[in-house]
Image (spheres, grey):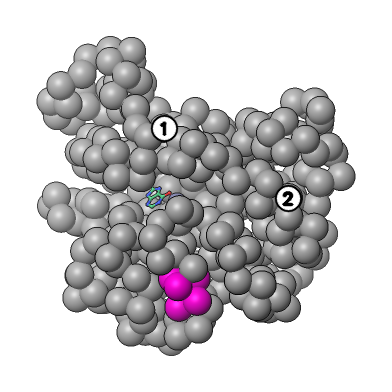
Amino acid sequence: EPTAAFVSGLPKAELHVHLEGTLEPDLKLALATRNGVDIGQSTVEEVRASYAFDSLASFLAVYYPAMDVLVTEQDFYDLATAYFRRAAADGVRHVEAFFDPQAHTTRGVPFETVISGLHRAAADAVGYGLSADLILCFLRDASAESAHETLLAALPYRDLLVGVGLDSDERGNPPAKFAEVFQLARDAGLKLTMHCDIDQVGSIENIRQVLGEVRVDRIDHGTNILEDPALVALVRERRIGLTCCPVSNSFVTADMKAREIVELLGLGVLVTLNSDDPAYFGAYVADTYTAFARQAGVGRDELVQLARNSFEASWLSASERAGYL
Ligand code: HPA
Ligand code: ZN
């Protein structure tokens, strides 16, 4: 089994992490105090006990209310900085991180407050050896109109974003619902990715939509693409990355999907390992690589390939990527 030193020494990119999912209990409490927000919890143990779930729905029911403590530009800066520093210590050199503006604007926090704090943290991360780009995620259980309004609010800050994504509850909210908004984002020069979560009814159909009418540049999760060999061949040929999150999967579906990830790796698909919501699932990137290696029974060679894949699947420029490959 690869050692912790080997795993953290491996240069890695993280392509699937929700910044709001990096809210550790101690920071949550500190922000609640700073902003005078009553969260009904007063100790780290109480907060940690509330971080309990066994499905995507039960996770989201804890995850969104926790964001009430995020109010000021400094709060968003502190949230992202804590994660970036932690990731850098894990050997992460480049991050493309999600944030959910609608989870904040619907509470009255201006888009500018959110993007300013996160961008300032990303700019400062260069000083400790990490490049960080931001991906605006739309909430798929909100309307297409709301996504459109959010994109319009974001366009003045377009240069602070690398792409757009789609997260939250997938059931009844297929990719095609957002095809127009994603086309507008592409026209603005943004990269596209969407969550195609595992074990959701009709999810292979959702993978078909993201590769067909939406034409994403990456897929978040997506291991069940194995159900359709023609789609597997397509992502392999187009070099479309799959951002897999084995520890997250183990909470939401009681299965890391390690067998599927190994199979996709063997088929030459650009699969990557990521943490998703590390404060909630208890594993940052290095622990995710280690947990995956243990479950999958793989060694250094496979982890090296997965780390290389993370740079190849990134949205760094070709010359920046070449520096890591
Ligand atoms: N799936 C959907 N929405 C999310 C996730 C996820 O894994 N993490 C944070 N928001
Ligand atoms: Zn996710």
* Residue 142 percent across, percent down from the top left: 21, 64
Q: Position of residue 290 (x, y in %)?
A: 70, 32
Q: Quadrant of residue 173?
A: bottom left
Is 137 or 85 nearer to us in this picture?
A: 137
> Is residue 259 found left or right of 5 in the rendered image?
left
Q: Which part of the image, by quadrant, shows the C terminus?
A: bottom right
Secondary structure state at the residue bearing disc 2: helix
**Residue drawn 63% across and 63% down?**
226
Asked if disc 1 is less than 8 Å from ligand 1, the answer is no
Indicate the position of residue 216 as horizontal and vertical percent values: 51, 75
Dot 1 crowding, Cα within 10 Å, few <14, some 14–19, many 20+:
many
- Residue 155's image quarter? bottom left
Label 1 sits on residue? 280
- Disc 2 within 8 angstroms of ligand 1 (CB): no
Does residue 78 appear to the left or right of 105 in the view shown?
A: right
Q: Is residue 135 above or below residue 234?
A: above
Is 161 in front, or is 2? 2
- Observer able to see residue 311: no
> Would residue 313 be seen by someone viewing this image from the given angle?
yes
Q: Earlier in the sequence, mark 1 or mark 2?
A: 2
User: Which residue is painted at 21% across and 38% down in the image?
Assistant: 65
Up the image or down, 73 lies above or below 100; here it is: above
| Amino acid type assigned to the residue bearing label 2 in the image | Val
User: What's the magenta region?
Assistant: 205-209
Frontmost residue, 19 versus 80: 19
Residue 87 quadrant = top right
Q: CA distance from mark 1 to mark 2?
A: 25 Å
What is the number of the mark on residue 262? Answer: 2
Q: Is residue 5 left or right of residue 139?
A: right
Q: Is residue 289 above or below residue 44?
A: below
